[in-house]
Amino acid sequence: MPVMQMPVREIDLVQMIRTALEYKGYTVFRTNQWRGDKAGSDPGVPDLLVRKKDWVPGTLLGIEVKTPKGRLSQTQKWVETIGGMIVVRSVEDALKALGEKV
């Protein structure tokens, strides 16, 4: 009998990615405040800002976390287009995007 997996909620995925990146030595800032089903940040602001000690001072990378079926808003698409953030859909995506071994 096939095993049914519960879909991962975005809020849980954000925390899993944050934990994995902190374990790998990144400083991770969460930019949104969750209140029930609503995020409390400005439109287009990525979920996480990350930094690693050996990066050029002042360098931060925005990471927008989406579930496998999640869609970007128009503002998020624009921010991604100008290079202001990357979009990831799993812990593995995040680690690979930062050049880390999975």
Image (cartoon, rainbow, N blue to C red):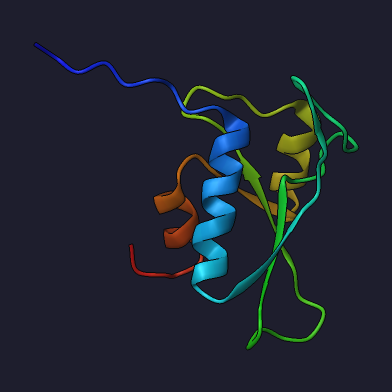
Q: Position of residue 30 (x, y in %)?
A: 75, 52
Q: Is residue 51 above or below residue 69?
A: below
Residue at the outermost right position: 42
Q: Nearer the viewer, residue 46 or 28?
A: 28
Residue at the outermost front position: 36
Q: Is residue 32 above or below residue 62?
A: above
Q: Quadrant of the N terminus?
A: top left
Q: Residue at x 53, y 52 (%)?
A: 17
Q: Residue at x 55, y 76 (%)?
A: 25
Q: Residue at x 60, y 43 (%)?
A: 14
Q: Position of residue 31 (x, y in %)?
A: 81, 49
User: Taking 5 as reference, is 84 left or right?
Assistant: right
| Image quadrant assignment for residue 87 | top right
Q: How many marks?
A: 0
| Image quadrant assignment for residue 10 | top right
Residue at the outermost top position: 1
Q: Position of residue 15 (x, y in %)?
A: 59, 46
User: Taking 87 as reference, is 56 left or right?
Assistant: right
User: Taking 65 as reference, is 85 left or right?
Assistant: right
Q: Quadrant of the C terminus?
A: bottom left
Q: Nearer the viewer, residue 67 or 34?
A: 34
User: Taking 87 as reference, is 42 left or right?
Assistant: right
Q: Position of residue 90 (x, y in %)?
A: 45, 43
